[in-house]
Every structure is written in structure tokens, then in C-alpha cells.
Amino acid sequence: MNPQILPTDVLPTDDPKSLIFEAFSMGPEFPGPAEDLLLSWILSLDVATDPRAAAQRLIAHHAADPDKFDNPHVRRLADLLAQTATTDPAMRGGRGRVAARRAASRSQG
């Protein structure tokens, strides 16, 4: 995402490949599927980025323009972001934890 066009409430690390930004910018033209885009977005986040906080900022920013939600795929993306934003942090697995578990199990056996 170009730092010059970032809204002040969204960090550059919240959408590093501008996937969410582009989908909401497309509005009714966004072809979906929202699930694939959300997965790509999550995988593009840096390990240090909290997906919940990033999702909260992104949905808060994009919810300000209701015209973007004319498309069912955009509404689904917004719902998925909202779910991500409210996910219990105790349920967070993440790439780092999976790698750590694999490394621990290899060293034990």
C-alpha cells in the first residue's frame, strides 16, 4: 500500500499488499470470493502484526462508506474481517506457533 494514500487510522502493516483496500475500492465490481481474499490477506501479514487489531482498523475505516457494501462479496469480506477482529486471542495459532511446535516435536523425538 502506498504510504502517501494511507488513511490516518490504518497502518501500512495492516494491509501490506493492499488486498483489502483494493477489494473495498472495487465495491460492486469485486468478484470475490471473500474467503480466498481474507486468507491471502492473513498470510501476507507480518508475524509481528496482530490480525485482530489490523482487521479492526480496516473494517472501521471501510465501514465509513456504505456504498461499498452493495456487493454481497464485499459484505462477506466485511463480515469475515469483523469475525477476525473479535476472535479470542487464546485461540490464535499462527505461523509462529505452528513452527515452534514442529521444532519442539522434532527435537524431542
Image (cartoon, rainbow, N blue to C red):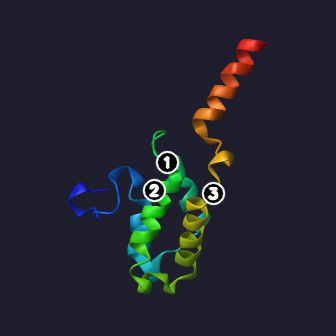
Q: Which residue is mark 2?
A: 54
Neighbour tally class for label 1: few under 14, some 14-19, many 20 plus, Cα within 10 Å? some
**Disc 2 residue type?**
Ala
Residue 23 drawn at (x, y percent): 44, 69
Residue tagged 1 = 50
- Name the residue type under label 3: Thr
| Left or right position of 84 against 11 | right
Query: Mark 3 and mark 1: span between their CA atoms?
Result: 11 Å
Residue 51 on image: x %, y %: 51, 52
Which residue is at a point 53% across and 47% down the rendered structure image?
43
- Picture quadrant of residue 94: top right
x and y percentages locating residue 24 in the rendered image: 43, 73
The circle drawn on residue 77 is: none
Residue visible at 61% across and 64% down in the picture: 83
User: Which residue: 58% across, 59% down?
Assistant: 84
Crowd tier of the residue under label 3, counting other residues whose Cα lies within 10 Å: few below 14, some 14–19, many 20 or above: few
The numbered disc on residue 87 is: 3
Q: Are marks 3 and 2 in contact (CB under 8 Å)?
A: no
Q: Residue furthest right?
A: 109
With respect to residue 41, does 94 lie above or below?
A: above
Locate the C terminus and report the quarter of the image it occupies: top right
Could you say whether the residue bearing mark 3 is in a helix, strand or loop? loop
| Mark 3 and mark 2: Cα distance apart in space | 12 Å
Q: Position of residue 1 (x, y in %)?
A: 32, 56
Do labels 2 and 1 touch, CB within 8 Å? yes
* Disc 2 element: helix
| Rendered image quadrant of residue 75 | bottom right
